[in-house]
Amino acid sequence: MIRNKVGVISLGIIGTIIITFTLATFFLLGIERIAVNIWALAFLLLSETALFGGLIGLRFAGTDHSKLFLRAGIPSALSLYFVATFVSVLFAGAFKERLNTFILIELAIISLFAIIIIAICAWSNVIARRSEADVKKVGNTEPKRGGF
């Protein structure tokens, strides 16, 4: 329990540092305060919050899911979501005249990765139930040595 608490606190501190750095970068670099840049900042902060919030939430994953599948899939999906958002934010200037298009692209990115994360959670639950069924059939969780 102590190790879990330390991990959550560490992730929270790292997330706070990253979000603070993002805000400082936006305000200290003198980035133009036009609508598309403000929306880009908002979506970037949302992706950072989702990334670190998801990693913290993963520490509290229940036993009714396959922890291996969750711990491999969720961080990968959240990291890819952050990267996709970051790349789209880098090209936000191209959407100065088409703010609605930029917002639509961001909403599409959010929707795509929300679907992926929901699917990972659903599959991890199915994998956990199948593993339970297999253990009940075999009656032993120990690996067999020297034979088939």
Image: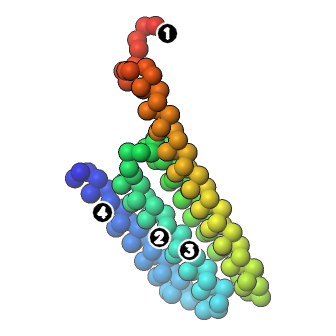
The numbered disc on residue 69 is none
Query: Do the residues bearing badges 2 and 1 touch, measured as CB atoms within 8 Å?
Result: no
Query: Mark 4 or 1 closer to N-term?
Result: 4
Classify residue 33 by image quadrant.
bottom right
Q: Would you say 103 lies left or right of 63 here?
A: right
Location of residue 74 in the rendering, given as x and y in whole percent from the top left corner:
51, 53
| Residue at the disc numbered 4 | 9
Mark 3: secondary structure: helix
| Residue at the disc numbered 3 | 44
User: Between 51 and 136, which is closer to the camera in this rendering?
Assistant: 136
State how far apart marks 3 and 2 are (Cα): 9 Å
Mark 1: secondary structure: loop
What amino acid type is highlighted by mark number 3? Leu
What amino acid type is highlighted by mark number 2? Thr
Query: Mark 2 or 4 closer to N-term?
Result: 4
Location of residue 53 in the rendering, given as x and y in whole percent from the top left corner:
43, 65
Residue drawn at the location 57% of the way across and 80% of the way down: 41
| Residue at the disc numbered 1 | 148
What amino acid type is highlighted by mark number 4? Ile
Location of residue 25 in the rendering, given as x and y in whole percent from the top left corner:
51, 80
State how far apart marks 3 and 1 are (Cα): 52 Å
The answer to whether residue 87 is seen in the rendering is no
Farthest residue to the bottom: give it: 33
